[in-house]
Amino acid sequence: MRPRSARRARFLLPVLVLAVAVFPLASCASGPKRTKMGEAARMLRDQGMTRAQLEELSNAFADRYFTLMLAASERVLRDNTDMQQRRIMNGLRLLGVSSMYDIATSPDTLTQLVDQLVVVTLQNFFWVDSGRSQAIWGEERAQPLVQNLRKAREDIWGIAAKVFTDEQLEELDLLISTWWTRRGGTEFVAYVRFSEVASVKGEQLIQTVRDGGGLLEPLDRAIDQAEEAKISLERTFFWAKRLPLFANWQAEALALDLVALPETELMVGNIDDVAQTFSSMPDRIERLMDRMEGTQRTLRDVVDMLFWRALALVGAITVALLILTWYRTKWRTAP
C-alpha cells in the first residue's frame, strides 16, 4: 500500500502546485474591470488634464454644437411655410452657433468651458425643459431640436466632468439653476456668460480649479508673449475658417426680419392691392367697353328717333302749307 500511496502523492503534488499557481490568475480574470477602472480614475485625477487638451475639447465641442444645430434647424425649416417659425429657428441657430465660436476664441481656456456649459444649459432650460419649442413648432417638428439640444447638454457636461470634481459640478449646476430661477426667461441666453451667472463663491470655485484644485492641471499664468501671440493667432484662424459656415444665416435673418416688420407688411399689402387692381383691369375695361357700346346704341336710337320725328314734322308742315296754298288760290279765283 505504501508504494501505491507514494506514487499517488508524487502524482497529486504537481497537480496541487499547478492549481495553486492558476488560482490567482483565475481570480484576477474574474474581476479586473473594477480594479482597472479605479486605477484609470485615479490616474486621471492624479495626472490632470492639460490646458492644450481642454482647449482641443472646447473647440471640438463648438464644431459639434454647429453640427447639431445645423441638422436640427434643417429638419425644422424643411417644408415650413410659416415665416415667423422660420425666423425664430434661424435666429436661434445663428445666435447659438456664433456665440459658441465666440466663446471658443476667448483667451482663457477654463472660461471657455464654463461659458459653453452656461449657454447650453440655459438653452435647454429655455427651449427644451419649458416646452417652448413644442409650443412654437409643434411636437413633431420640434423633436429634432429638442433631441440635439439635449445631446449638446450631455456632451458639455461630460467634458466638464473631466475638469471638475463631482462636488464642483453640483455647485456649478446650482449656480446656473439659481440664476435662471431669479433672472432667467430671456430668449437671448446664447450670450449669457459665466461671469454674469457666478457669485463670489462661483468665482472662487473657478480660481480653485485654475490653481489645480480640480481635475485640471494648474494653469501657468506666466505664459510668455510669444506663446500668447501664437494662441491668439490660432484662435483667430479658428474663427475665420468657420465664419463662412453660417454667414448665409445672417443674410437669411435679415431677409426674415424685413418681412416681419410692420412697414414691410403694409408695403406687401399695398403691393397686393396694386397687383389685384392690375389683374382686375381687363375686366373693368371690358365692362367699360360694354357700357360705352350700350351708350352708343342708345345715342344712335335717340338720334334716329329725333330724325324721324323731325322728318315727320317737316312733312306735316309741308302738307299743311300745300293745303293752305290750295285754299287761298281757290278762294281768289272764285266769282
Image: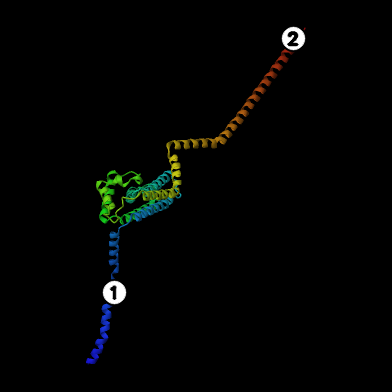
Which of marks 2 and 1 precedes in the sequence? 1
Give the amino acid at mark 2: Trp
Q: Residue furthest top?
A: 335
Mark 1 or mark 2: which is in front?
1
Q: Is residue 51 left or right of residue 262?
A: left
Give the quadrant of the N terminus: bottom left
Q: Is residue 217 above or below residue 289?
A: below
Q: Residue at x 62, y 28 (%)?
A: 296
Residue under numbered circle 1: 25
Give the quadrant of the C terminus: top right
| Residue nearer the viewer, 44 or 125 | 44
Rendered location of residue 136, percent (x, y):
38, 46
Q: What's the distance in space between the residues labelled 1 and 2, CA to CA?
A: 170 Å
Rendered location of residue 65, percent (x, y):
38, 52
Can residue 159 be seen here? The reply is yes
Can residue 151 be seen here? The reply is no
The circle on residue 321 is none
Q: Is residue 267 above or below residue 2?
A: above
- Give the quadrant of residue 321: top right
Residue under numbered circle 2: 331
